[in-house]
Amino acid sequence: MNRRELYHDYLCWRAMTMKNQVLNIAFSPCPLKWSQELLAQTDMTATVCDTRSQLPKISADHKIILIHLDALRNFELAIIIQLRNQLPHAILIGWITSNSLPDELALRLITHGLNALISDAYTPKEFLTVINDCLNHAHHINHFFSRAMLHEYQRRHDITSLNDREQDAIRLRREGKTAVEIADRLCVSKKTIDQLFWKIYRRTGHRNFQELCHTLQHERKNLVQELVGATDPFPATNSLK
């Protein structure tokens, strides 16, 4: 028996220890077939819940919770928050019936408490790997997670890399200046100022100036906390004295 077969047997053993500890939540009966077949092939049994109105009765014995997330309405997000609050140590795995998901939405799901995001293209062996990763590392990192984190990194980079003219325009706008007044102060046309703000909104993913200011304030607060909590990158032993 080679190493790969041994690892697969180990994953199957881990799955068998989760029998009767899985809750399978779907908001319509259609997608349940794939998840039920997947669990059956991994020797795992699950309490099936088909609900459209309210959260089912959750037991503390449920260690793994599968949540179908195709609709992705506010109700489903509220379910995730409530599940995470009730079962802080449970593994929440969201699954969708497609292989694509908007990065912003994936990031919201991650920050709401999901440990993994998978699609119905996952095989039983891949599903066992997901569970093992969540048990050992709290999260399973796949293309859903990595793309969402990359998107957030790019957004934060765009926010913190505003040039001097953009920062001046934002500062003047915060002071209550109109686009015409900002244009006069910066010696450009009003059309240039309108285009400048439009490009900032598009690049940073904001809809208006209020959202932009909120994000800037939040990022500045995080930066202060990071600097306060940071250690000296140049300790005395490395200083040129």
Image: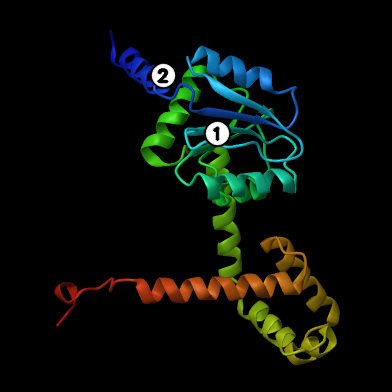
Locate residue 12: give its quadrant.
top left
The residue that appears at 28% across and 71% down in the rendered structure is 233
Residue 178, how many percent across, how many down?
Answer: 82, 86
Q: Residues within 10 Å of mark 1 (few under 14, many from 20)?
A: many
Numbered mark located on residue 16 in the image: 2
Q: Is residue 162 left or right of residue 17?
A: right
**Which one is in front, 98 or 22?**
22
- At 58% from the left edge and 50% from the top edge, which residue is drawn? 112
- Residue 94 lies, in percent from the top left, at 60, 36
Kindly identify the amino acid type of the residue bearing the numbered disc 1. Answer: Ile
* In-image side of 223 versus 26 (left or right): left
Please tell me the numbered disc located at residue 65.
Answer: 1
Residue 192 vs 172, above or below: the answer is above
Apparent side of residue 118 relative to residue 101 in the rendered image (left or right)? left
Colouring convention used in this rendered image of the protein? rainbow
Residue type at numbered disc 2: Met
- Residue 209 in picture, x, y percent from top left: 75, 74
Q: Residue at x 43, y 25 (%)?
A: 18
Task: Locate the C terminus and report the quarter of the image it occupies.
Answer: bottom left
Residue 173 vertical position relative to residue 200 in the rendered view, above or below = below
